[in-house]
Image (spheres, rainbow, N blue to C red):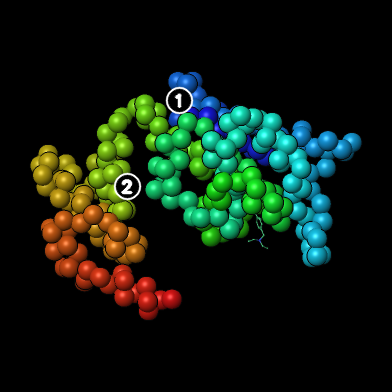
Amino acid sequence: MRFDVFTLFPEIFESPLQVSILKRAQEMGRLEVVLHNIRDYATDKHHVTDDTPYGGGGGMVMKPEPIFAAVESVLGEALGEVPVILLTPQGRLFTQDVARELARHERIALICGRYEGVDERVRQHLATDEISIGDYVLTGGELPALVIIDAVTRLLPGVLGDPGALIEDSHTWGLLEYPHYTRPAVFRGWAVPEVLRSGHHAEIARWRRQQALRRTWERRPDLLAKAALSEEDRAFLQTLGWNAGDELVNEWENE
Ligand code: 9D3
């Protein structure tokens, strides 16, 4: 998988790509990240990449010419085949489903916006997709681009040492995780739940499932609407006060 990243601040990407799983994925040849400084494609004497907005108002807008020049020069013949994703607060929300969808591509271009935004013609005539990573205000698209690279890379075949980890993901998908413990059995007087030390694998599995269900019900009840729940799961949730279909009702009540 190759990512071409277009940015005014390529330095932001250096450390995150040089450690842990992203580092190993690159060494394995599964991941390639090529950074392109948009400023290098500005043709004027001072390599200007931003300008004041037509119509007035505050802030600066990223000029279209250097972005088009950079993406067209780098993608060349591949333009039209490779997804060109613009990171903006107005984009569609990045989720695990979107990560899975992106992981199917061999090559992806990511354009990182800065300042108040990017000239609309980039969105209309160069980008094929627009993505936001959530409803909070960041200083630019670089951290979102790293989030996407990170989430997609761990889905690539062979990148995670243990293929069981991905199966586990799909199994528990839609629920929050159960609590994890490691040694010591008692730390500062706080003991690990007895069931985890019992060696009863079926009981451990049931306890973990119930913990995951309880946590999801308490913290993210919205997730239960989409989760894959067995009859046993439903019965347990009902002991907590959950009723199937509540989420739908709440959505109407909350909006
Ligand atoms: C005053 C209006 N602001 C929009 C909410 C302007 C603005 C703020 C922040 C325009 C760009 C930015 C920089 N953010 C991104 O480029 C960005 C982003 C984000 O801020 N949150 C979540 N996902 C993303 S993807 C790109």
Give residue 84's position: percent from left, percent from top.
58, 41
Q: What distance separates the C-alpha of mark 1 from that of mark 2?
A: 43 Å
Q: Secondary structure at mark 2?
A: loop
Residue 82, above or below 224: above
Give whichever of 187, 35 is nearer the camera. Answer: 35
Rendered image: mark on residue 83:
none
Tell me the quarter of the picture where residue 212 sits.
Answer: bottom left
- Residue drawn where x is 29% and y is 63% of the image: 225
Left or right of 36? Residue 28 is: left
Residue nearest the viewer, comparing 164 with 75: 75
Residue toward you, 236 or 1: 1
Q: Quadrant of ligand 1?
A: bottom right
Amino acid on which disc 1 is placed: Arg
Viewer-closest of 160 and 37: 37
Q: Amino acid at mark 2?
A: Arg
Task: In the rendered view, tell whether residue 136 sits above or below residue 65.
Answer: below
Mark 2 Cα shell of 10 Å, populated few (<14), some (14-19), many (≥20) = few
Q: Which residue is mark 2?
A: 188
Task: Categorize mark 1 by other alpha carbons within 10 Å: few (<14), some (14-19), many (20+).
Answer: some
The quadrant of the image that shows the C terminus is: bottom left
Q: Is residue 205 left or right of residue 69?
A: left
Instruction: State the residue position of label 1.
Output: 30
User: Relative to 121, is 128 on the left or the right?
Assistant: left
Q: Which of the two discs, 1 and 2, labels the residue nearer the N terminus?
A: 1
Q: Is mark 2 within 8 Å of ligand 1?
A: no
Helix, strand, or loop for circle 1?
A: loop
Residue 211 falls in which quadrant of the image?
Answer: bottom left
Q: Position of residue 250 (x, y in %)?
A: 34, 74
As drawn, 120 above or below 171: below
